[in-house]
Each structure stands twice: as structure tokens, then as C-alpha cells.
Image (cartoon, grey):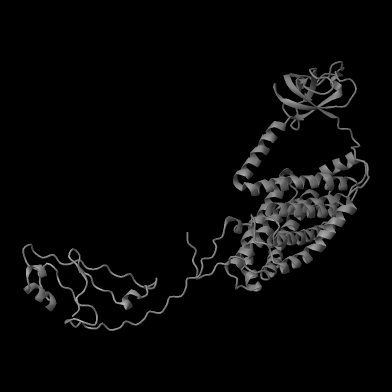
Amino acid sequence: MPRDIADDDTGPIRRVPAESARRPAPPRDSPPTPPPRAPRRRPSGQPPRVTDPAERAAHRSGPAERARPAVPPPAGGGTRRRRAEPPSAPEPPSAPEPPEPPRPTEAATGHGHGPVPPASRRVRRLLAALLAPFAAAMVVGVVVLYPWGAPEPTSATPSGTPVHGVVTGVTAGPCLSPGGVRVGEPAPGTDEACRHVEVRLTDGAAPGTTLRKIVPVEPSTPRFTVGDEVVLSYFGADPANPDSYQLNDFQRGLPLAALAVLFAAAVLALGRWRGLMALVALGLSFVVLVLFVFPAILAGENPLLVAIAGAGVIMFVALYSTHGLSARTSVAVLGTMVSLTLIGGISALFSATAALTGLDEDTATLIAALGHGVDSRGLLLAGVVIGALGVLDDVTVTQASAVWELRRANPALRWRELYGAALRIGRDHVGSAVNTLVMAYAGAALPVLLLATLSGVGLSTVLTSQDIAQEIVRTLAGSIGIIAAVPITTLLAALVATREEPDGALSPASPRTG
């Protein structure tokens, strides 16, 4: 038997066969190899048990030979015949693990706020073909209805120039102006039926001048106290004469500014960059109202057409600036535009059949200030369209985002299945949205509702009166538009989403980690 190379300190070195050196590593999915068992400890002083014949021969030899324990000979030689182990069946190679899908970020959830993957060319062409007619009609409406070159409208009833002042004194006294003559005896208890309010002017034609105004004590007149900051109307003539002024109201600039700052801070704290874009969109909406809607209606244009055109501009500016240029935003714009048109048609039809004139107290005051006629029923319809725009935006954006998220979660859904799943989500949203609109109109018309309740003429008579009936038409027409916006937007979103390649789809077999 050939002798292995050995070292006196480390003992014999056993050669490793080439087959063992080239043995492949176990697959990743195989169970871990158990650790080797520790050798059993023998009592001190007891010689080790020798079982191998070669070791027995070395044990019977001299001390130098016993110092080097023998080891089994390498494969292919030696006196010990080892029992051949049965070859184990080769394990099938494990399939490669699929790559983990990208985790959805905050921008891909919720209302779709944030950047989304760009739409394919096919989807962009489809959306452009659907949006082009509405955009063209909106542009034509703005150009045609805007009062180009018309003079700036002025009020036929003078309202005076606003002047600010501070109340310096309030006393009770008769309702008789200085220099006036009382005829007959005053009624009992009317000697001090008025308040004499002294006001020091802080700006205007005579700042620093103190005026005394007589204010009757009535339920409809405000109560002024010392230190109140008030607003007066100056009608010209002598700026030092109290008769040239009229005490109107309180100054509310500072509290309203503080509330606006608090509102903006809350929006920015929660929405951050998206909240900033929402505030920008809100400002642009007011710009559209002030620069287009108000001048066009005051110039005598049809209020309903002006409201639809203005609402279209507000919708395009607000949605795209807040939610970004994406396919889901375009679908929300389409659904909002179709629903607004439906609301305008329904409100026009039922306001005509119900013979609603729109002539309430505010409208009568407006007509008197204009000095010419105005379409009062059109003003009613314009209020319905503009009032429903904010709720429609929320509904359409939510439905479009729901469709895209369902498509992303399961790309195998066809448009009918996608439509049905998203419509079930929309049913939950409709109830709260309709209730929001009803409560908003009921809160705005609360004094009218209370007055009608006190009339005692019966419920049917109250509901069919002019003031209450127009609020009913506003509420129901807007609610029908909100209800119709859910299936319309969901259908458009399902048709468009199924024609777009899903980005980062989540497979049911690939769980998300982290």
C-alpha cells in the first residue's frame, strides 16, 4: 500500500479524490446539512477503542508508530473495504425565482395624486379624439361669450365709497336727528329707542373726524360697541357732515385673512406639493370667475352657457394642474364634462316645466343695480352648474383612479369585469357625495326653510313655493349628475385602461415584501 504524505505535527494528509472536489454545490432550496455530531468523551485514563485493522497494527508497533494514528487508505487501495453507499437520486434543479414586482408608491394609490406612467401612443390618440370636441366647444364658447370691447358695467344705484372708522362711544337716545322737530307726544317707551354711535374716521376724505350716527334698535340692525372697527359708505358732499355717511357693517378683513392662512397651512401640511398645486388651481378658478363668468353675465349673455363654458375652463385648469397630465386625469375630465352637460340639461328642462322664475330677493337687488333686465332663470341654472362642479371633480377622479388600480392589480381583467368591480366601489361613494350636496344646499337655504316652516300653510304649499322649489331643483339636478358621473366615468376609464399596457402589475403569486 503506498504511503500517504504525512507531517509529524498534523498527522497523515488524506488525498481528496477529484470527483469529490468537483461535486456541485447543493441547490438553494435543499434542506440544510445537519452539523456533525460531536465525538463521545471517554473517561480519563482509558485508552481509545481501536476498531480499524490498520490502527490495530500501528498500536501493536513501537511508540513512534503509535504517535501517528493511522487513517483509512485512499479510495482504490488499502485493506478496509468500505460499504458502497447507494447513489442518491439527483434533485431536480429549482426553477429560478421570479423577480419581485415593484412596490406601489404613494403616487400610484388613492386618488391617483402624483406622477403616473405615461400613456401609450394608442391611448393618447384615443383620449385626444374624445377630448378634442369638448375643448373646441369650450374655447369657442369663451371667445363668443366674452364681452369684447364692452364698457365696464356700473351700478345704477349708488352704493358709496367705503370708509373705515372706529366706534368711540355709544349712548341711548331718541330717534331724532340734530335740528329735527318732533310733532306730538312720543309713544311710551320710545324716548330711547335709538343708539347714538360716535365714529372716528381712520381713512377717506376726512381722516380723524368724529361723526355721530343714529342707529335704530331693531332686530335687523347690528349692535355696535366701543372699540368696534366699522365700515361706512361715503356719498360725497361735505366730508365732515354726518349726513354724507351711512354706517353699514363691521370690518372683517383680519379674521378672514387669518382663516385663509390657516386653511392654506392645513392644505400644505397634509398635501405638501400636491396641496400647493391645489391652492394654485383654486386661485386660477377664482381668476376664471372674475375675468370671464362675471363680466359675461353682467353684459347680458346667457348665464347658463356662460356657466358651462366657465366650468369647462375651471375643470381643465384645476384637474390637470392638481393631478397632472395623465390618462386617468383625462378620463376624469371627460366624465366631468359629460355630467356637467347632463346637469345643465336636466335643470333647464325642469326649471321651465316648473315655471321657476329665479326672482328671489338677491336677484331683484341685482336687477335694480344693473338698470336693465337679466335672465333670472339662467342665473338659477348657472348656480346649479357651478355649485355641482366641485363634487363632480371628486367623484370622477376617484372612479378613474379606482379603475386604474384594479387594472394594475389584475391585468387579466377585461373591460366588462373592470367596469363591474369599479362600479361597486362607486356605489359607496355616491351615497356620501349626494348627501354632501343636499346638506350644502340645505345649509345655504336654511333661513328660507325656517321662514317657510313658520308660515303654517302646509308642507305641499311650502315645497312648491318659489324659494323652496328652486332649491329642490338645484339639489336633485346636481344629485342626478353626480349619480350619472359614476357609470359614465367608470365606463370610459375601463375602455381606456384595457387598451393600455399595465405598468408594474401585481401578480397573485408574487407576494409583496418589506
Observer-nearest of 502 and 184: 502
| In the image, farthest residue toward the top | 179
For the N terminus, which image quadrant?
bottom left
Q: Is residue 274 above or below residue 259?
A: below
Observer-nearest of 39 and 472: 39
Position of residue 61 in the picture relative to residue 391 (left or right): left
For the point 75% across and 54% down, the residue is: 315
| Count of residue discs | 0
For the point 81% across and 55% down, the residue is: 308
Measuring from the top left, give residue 150's x and y in whole percent.
93, 44
Residue 417 visible somewhere in the drawing = yes
Position of residue 73 in the picture relative to residue 508 (left or right): left
Q: Is residue 424 above or below residue 467?
A: below
Q: Is residue 198 above or below residue 40?
A: above
Measuring from the top left, give residue 343's x and y in whole percent.
77, 59
Measuring from the top left, give residue 511's x and y in whole percent.
49, 66
Would you identify the image quadrant in which residue 433 lies?
A: bottom right
Would you identify the image quadrant in which residue 478 lies?
A: bottom right
For the point 64% across and 65% down, the residue is: 403
Position of residue 373 in the picture relative to residue 75 (left or right): right
Measuring from the top left, give residue 222's x and y in whole percent.
73, 29
Observer-nearest of 392 and 319: 319
Residue 469 visible somewhere in the drawing = no
